[in-house]
Amino acid sequence: MNATPLLMLVVLGLAFWLMVLRPAKARQRAALNIQNQLVIGQRVMTTAGMFGYVRELDETEIGLEISDGVVVRYVREAIAKVVDTEASATDATPATDAVADVSDGEESVVDVSRNQ
């Protein structure tokens, strides 16, 4: 009896498990870990790319402040990652800093890379 086809199926199944299923479970475990360790005041990014600060915590939902006084509700599963608060504090400058004074008629460049 030839065992080569059976051996190839086992090798293919093992390769599929190593390359697809195992990394997916690790990503899922990491996301669940992030969602369970949320604390009020952390800056987070949702899966849709919305940035905000955690203002309310519930078993299944969080309140995310996306602008001054604007708190929206998200399910915990929508949080993709916690953004480094030290880096965001140095980048957080008022939008008026990036606005150029164009009253003198000269052409000026506006730096929008710091706006979020």
Image: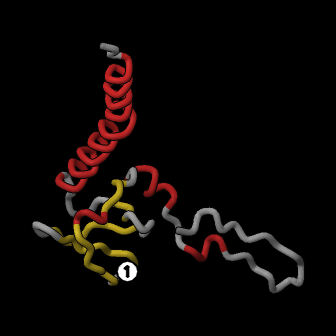
Residue 54: x and y in percent read 27, 67
Which of the two residues, 76 or 84, is positioned nearer the viewer here? 76
Residue corresponding to mark 1: 68
Q: Residue shown at 33%/83% (left/top)?
A: 69
Query: Residue 73: which quarter of the image?
Result: bottom left
Q: Residue shown at 67%/76% (left/top)?
A: 99
Query: Residue 111: which quarter of the image?
Result: bottom right
Q: Quick one: label 1, few (<14), some, or many (20+) residues within 10 Å?
A: few
Side of 116 relative to 74 (left or right): right
Residue 7: x and y in percent read 33, 19
Side of 82 relative to 48 (left or right): left
Residue 35: x and y in percent read 22, 56
Which of the two residues, 22 or 26, is positioned nearer the viewer here? 22
**Residue most extreme to the left:** 59
Against 82, residue 102 (above or below) is below
Quadrant location of the N terminus in the rendered image: top left
Query: Residue 64: which quarter of the image?
Result: bottom left
Side of 51 relative to 25 (left or right): right
How many circles with numbers are drawn on the protein? Answer: 1
Which of the two residues, 58 or 87, is positioned nearer the viewer here? 58
Q: Residue shown at 49%/55% (left/top)?
A: 90
**Residue most extreme to the top:** 1
Which of the two residues, 103 or 54, is positioned nearer the viewer here? 54
> Which amino acid, mark 1?
Asp
Residue 11: x and y in percent read 36, 23
Q: Residue shown at 38%/75% (left/top)?
A: 66
**Residue most extreme to the front:** 1
**Residue most extreme to the right:** 106
Element type at mark 1: loop
Against 111, residue 9 (above or below) is above
Against 16, residue 82 (above or below) is below
Against 84, residue 101 (above or below) is below
